[in-house]
Image (cartoon, rainbow, N blue to C red):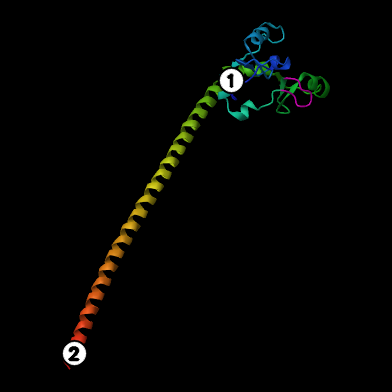
Amino acid sequence: MATSQQHTCDICMNQHITEYAIVRCPECDENFCEKCKTHHEFSKATKNHEVISVDNFRKIPKFVQDFNFSCPEHDESFVLYFDTHDKPCCAYSFHNAHTRCRNSTPLHTLIKNIKESSSLADLVTTISDLTKYLTNISEDRSKNLQDLVEQKNRIEMKIKTTKEAFNTCLDKLEADLLTNYRKHLLNKNSRYKIY
């Protein structure tokens, strides 16, 4: 069943065919159905690309999904990373704008090194710890909110009970005053009748 969350195959969409994607290639920045995935795996230019399932891609935070892996000027994939500029560049930029620049590293080497480094494991641990911490904060805030609602209900009930007690007391006082007044009035009336 198709949902709004399903991604369509980019290759098929270009041919005006609707097929739902099962994998995504971050390097190509495209989604592929089963048939196109097979072509992608065997194509000389893309056979070394690592694909991820669309389900796993959906789990990636939105800001990572939206990251542009292509050069905004030339619409080509980044291939090098320049330590000097602290940014990636495409082959076209390298040949035309960065011919004198040194200290460049192929992105695939950096990615391989990142995957094998302990820094990635540390980052994953840190993110996991932060996620737990934020979850605890969220749960604490929810509990605090629930406690505030319960406290408000108790205070409202106490105010209502106190008001009812005051009203009962005032009603009794009113009844006593009226009774005393009537007695006093009867007493006065009876004295005047004697004379």
Local crowd size for mark 2, using a 10 Å CA cut-off: few (<14), some (14–19), many (≥20): few
> Residue 154: x percent and y percent?
34, 51
Residue extending furthest bottom? 195
> Residue 156: x percent and y percent?
37, 54
Give the camera-side residue of 190 and 129.
190
Span shown in magenta: 70-77
Give the camera-side residue of 20 and 105.
20
Task: Give the residue pinned by disc 2.
Answer: 193
Task: Give the residue pinned by disc 1.
Answer: 2
Q: Give the residue at x 29% y 68%.
A: 170
Residue extending furthest right? 96
Instruction: Kindly report the distance in space between the C-alpha atoms of the residues bearing marks 1 and 2.
Output: 99 Å
Q: Secondary structure at mark 1?
A: loop
> Which quadrant would the C terminus be assigned to in this image?
bottom left
Amino acid type at mark 1: Ala
Magenta segment includes 67? no
Compared with 107, 62 (above or below) is: below
